[in-house]
Amino acid sequence: MSFTRYSKPVPEGLVVCETREQMNQAARDHPETVLHDEDGGYYLKDMNGIPVAVAADSLCPELDKSFAEADTMIAQNQLEGEDQMGTDDGLDSTAGCGLG
């Protein structure tokens, strides 16, 4: 296991996750946590920002892909939301359709 992606030393005492299943188990063991992309890698942190688990280099490419996919989905949803908001002319959307 290595942590070459991280620019700062990884704190001791964290659960080290080399696979997605290990990270999933760490999240189940610590349900009040969020996965953060940070310092070139990924930390599972509690709600106070305290890391409880870290992704080893072997897991990071998979998490990179997942985060990129999530970012794409969020961007698409925001664009779709902007498109819907941009067409709002203040009229009921059913006006002129015989439904409103």
Image (spheres, rainbow, N blue to C red):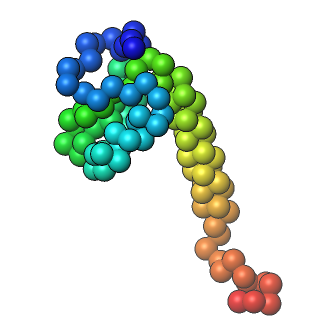
Residue at screen point 55% across, 35% down: 66
Task: Judge from the rendering whether residue 64 lies leftward or rightward of residue 30; answer left or right.
Answer: right
Q: Position of residue 81 (x, y in %)?
A: 60, 57
Farthest-out residue, right = 97
Task: Judge from the rendering whether residue 61 lies leftward or rightward of residue 55; answer left or right.
Answer: right
Q: Where is residue 96 in the image (x, y as percent from the top left)?
A: 79, 84
Q: Name the image quarter holding residue 1.
A: top left
Quadrant housing the C terminus: bottom right
Q: Where is residue 6 in the image (x, y as percent from the top left)?
A: 36, 14
| Front in this rendered view, residue 82 or 42 | 42
Q: Where is residue 52 in the image (x, y as percent from the top left)?
A: 25, 34
Residue at screen point 69% across, 77% down: 93
Residue 86 appears in view = no
| Front in this rendered view, residue 74 or 43 | 43
Residue at screen point 57% across, 50% down: 78
User: With respect to residue 96, does 43 lie above or below?
Assistant: above
Q: Name the image quarter holding residue 23.
A: top left
Residue 65 appears in view = yes
Residue at screen point 48% across, 34% down: 20
Task: Judge from the rendering whether residue 11 lies leftward or rightward of residue 53; answer left or right.
Answer: left
User: With respect to residue 79, does 58 lie above or below?
Assistant: above
| Front in this rendered view, residue 47 or 91 | 47
- State the count of labels: 0
User: With respect to residue 27, does 100 lie above or below?
Assistant: below
